[in-house]
Image (spheres, rainbow, N blue to C red):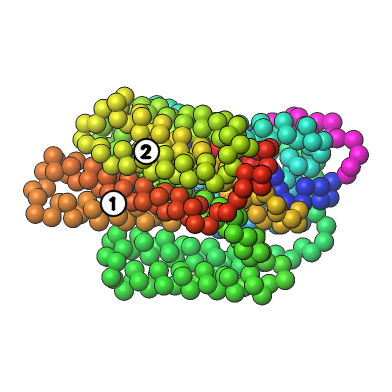
């Protein structure tokens, strides 16, 4: 699974001295990079551990998606608020609090005795991650004020984001296979302890000045709306789409999101200034990001289960088998950076969406004994190439031309759209999967052969819906994005993982 987006925060020099650079900035960069690695790891390391965690804690198929969505919903829903808190409360202080909370939440998850306890721990991880990630990014901008050095610092940070997802897949496999799935969470504790011990003496404090009011109502309402939507999708898997509970939670989610828009329009200090979304190209980029996240996150969940449950791969083998997507992303990201100045953002985004959808469609042809080298490997590489060709121009397009005072909100929104899209997509695809499995077993004998066939059928259905969401992302780009190649900066504003 790709890592989180890393972007420069909004007011680059807010509260920063223009004097000599901090003498220990490069050591501080290493500390900050550790925090980024920890956050990125948790996006993929838990995926590999999920089949074992589900069996150990007795989590149902309909509810297992909460292990992923509890984290991404809290992270995406609170990210904008976390960035503002970091700016005005103090970036170092927020970094330390976020790191400490993340470690404690990881301990709670590692010691979980029920599915609900694990879901709560993952939500707490997401909430503290929403403090940690923007604080770390802001500290980078504070520490590196010279253009060349800042570019190097963000290149390191971006490399961590890109490579971290691959490390998570491998580390998750190693810990799950040779220790226990719980160590995929507990491993964060020593990492956080080292980072905190080094950050206290090495990282300087900084904060922005001015209006320090927070849009807490907006944060609460948007997060509640998203949780209600996801819970509605979960109820659909259990009770059906026409059930009163399903329709009630989905309707409540829509109403809460509408209320969030009203709050933002009337707030003097909105969490998400809606003018950011009203630019046609930027709005198209955000919608594309949401749809790509929706199709992608869920697909990775089912690929992990297919490897381990149907093909009987060991956790480490499943981690290794998932690496081709990351390889494809990294290869395409380099190519996209070279092609973007010549072709512009839109052609690359459309082509990338088409490639990613093609890779997903190839995955719809899996069977109970599909070969890896001739089918699963090329499908994942094509999927990764498509994502790489989409994300790099999308990230630049989302931020180009943003006024300096809105840059932080715009960059955080880009990250949040991927997380929120992933949350909604995972819940939706899991609902389609459970419904497809149940429908397949109707009228068939409940023997092991039919059970496995039903699982594979469910995975095919999930991959097909994932492909459909990615196609919608391509259509959103075609319809909404009206950009010329000369409008796109040649430098990389954003590094994708």
Residue 457, position as x, y percentages in the image: 22, 45
- Check disc 1 and report its element: helix, strand or loop: helix
Quarter location, residue 281: bottom right
- Kindly report which numbered mark, 1 or 2, lies closer to the viewer in this rendering: 2
Residue designated by label 1: 433
Q: Nearer the viewer, residue 360 or 176?
A: 360
Residue 101 tag number: none
Cα distance, mark 1 to mark 2?
Answer: 19 Å
The residue segment tinted magenta is 17-33
- Check disc 2 and report its element: helix, strand or loop: helix
Quarter location, residue 375: top left
Q: What is the residue that sits farthest to the right in this orientation?
A: 19
Residue at 28% in and 42% down: 364
Quarter location, residue 268: bottom right
Q: Are marks 1 and 2 in contact (CB under 8 Å)?
A: no
Q: In this view, does 245 lie to the left or right of 353?
A: left
Residue 12, position as x, y percentages in the image: 77, 47
The magenta stretch spans residue 31: yes
Residue at 70% in and 44% down: 8
Residue 303, position as x, y percentages in the image: 34, 39
Residue designated by label 2: 359
Image position of 44 with respect to 121: above or below: above
Could one spot residue 251 in this view of the protein?
A: yes
Q: Of marks 1 and 2, which one's residue comes earlier in the chain?
A: 2
Could one spot residue 79 in this view of the protein?
A: no
Q: How crowded is mark 2: few (under 14 residues within 10 Å), some or many (20 or more)?
A: many
Residue at 63% in and 57% down: 80
């Amino acid at each position: 699974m790709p890592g989180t987006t890393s972007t420069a925060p909004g007011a680059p020099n807010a509260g920063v001295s223009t004097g000599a650079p901090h003498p220990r900035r490069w050591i501080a960069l290493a500390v900050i990079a550790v925090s980024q690695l920890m956050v990125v790891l948790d996006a993929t390391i838990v995926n590999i551990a999920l089949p074992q965690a589900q069996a150990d804690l007795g989590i149902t198929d309909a509810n297992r998606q909460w292990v992923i969505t509890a984290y991404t919903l809290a992270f995406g829903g609170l990210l904008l608020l976390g960035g503002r808190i970091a700016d005005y409360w103090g970036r170092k202080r927020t970094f330390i609090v976020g790191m400490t909370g993340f470690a404690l939440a990881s301990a709670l998850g590692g010691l979980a005795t029920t599915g609900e306890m694990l879901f709560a721990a993952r939500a707490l991880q997401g909430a503290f991650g929403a403090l940690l990630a923007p604080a770390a990014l802001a500290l980078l901008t504070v520490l590196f004020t010279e253009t060349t050095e800042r570019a190097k610092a963000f290149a390191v940070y971006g490399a961590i984001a890109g490579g971290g997802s691959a490390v998570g897949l491998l580390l998750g496999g190693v810990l799950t296979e040779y220790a226990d799935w719980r160590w995929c969470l507990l491993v964060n504790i020593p990492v956080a302890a080292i980072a905190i011990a080094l950050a206290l003496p090495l990282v300087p404090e900084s904060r922005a000045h001015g209006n320090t009011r927070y849009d807490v109502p907006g944060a609460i309402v948007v997060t509640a709306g998203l949780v209600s939507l996801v819970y509605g999708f979960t109820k659909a898997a259990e009770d059906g789409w026409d059930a009163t509970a399903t329709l009630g939670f989905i309707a409540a989610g829509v109403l809460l999101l509408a209320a969030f828009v009203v709050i933002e329009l009337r707030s003097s200090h909105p969490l998400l200034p809606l003018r950011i979304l009203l630019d046609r190209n930027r709005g198209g980029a955000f919608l594309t990001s949401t749809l790509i996240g929706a199709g992608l996150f869920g697909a990775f969940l089912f690929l992990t289960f297919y490897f381990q449950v149907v093909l009987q791969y060991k956790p480490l083998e499943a981690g290794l088998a998932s690496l081709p997507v990351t390889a494809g992303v990294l290869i395409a990201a380099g190519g996209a950076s070279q092609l973007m100045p010549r072709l512009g953002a839109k052609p690359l985004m459309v082509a990338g969406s088409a490639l990613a959808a093609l890779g997903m469609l190839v995955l719809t042809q899996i069977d109970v004994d599909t070969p890896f080298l001739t089918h699963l490997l090329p499908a994942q590489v094509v999927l990764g190439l498509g994502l790489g060709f989409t994300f790099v121009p999308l990230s630049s397009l989302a931020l180009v031309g943003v006024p300096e005072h809105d840059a932080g909100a715009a960059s955080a929104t880009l990250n949040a759209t991927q997380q929120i899209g992933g949350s909604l997509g995972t819940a939706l695809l899991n609902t389609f999967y459970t419904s497809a499995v149940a429908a397949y077993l109707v009228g068939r004998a409940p023997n092991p052969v039919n059970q496995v066939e039903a699982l594979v059928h469910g995975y095919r259905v999930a991959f097909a819906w994932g492909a459909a969401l990615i196609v919608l992302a391509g259509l959103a780009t075609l319809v909404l994005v009206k950009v010329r190649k000369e409008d796109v900066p040649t430098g990389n504003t954003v590094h994708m993982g």
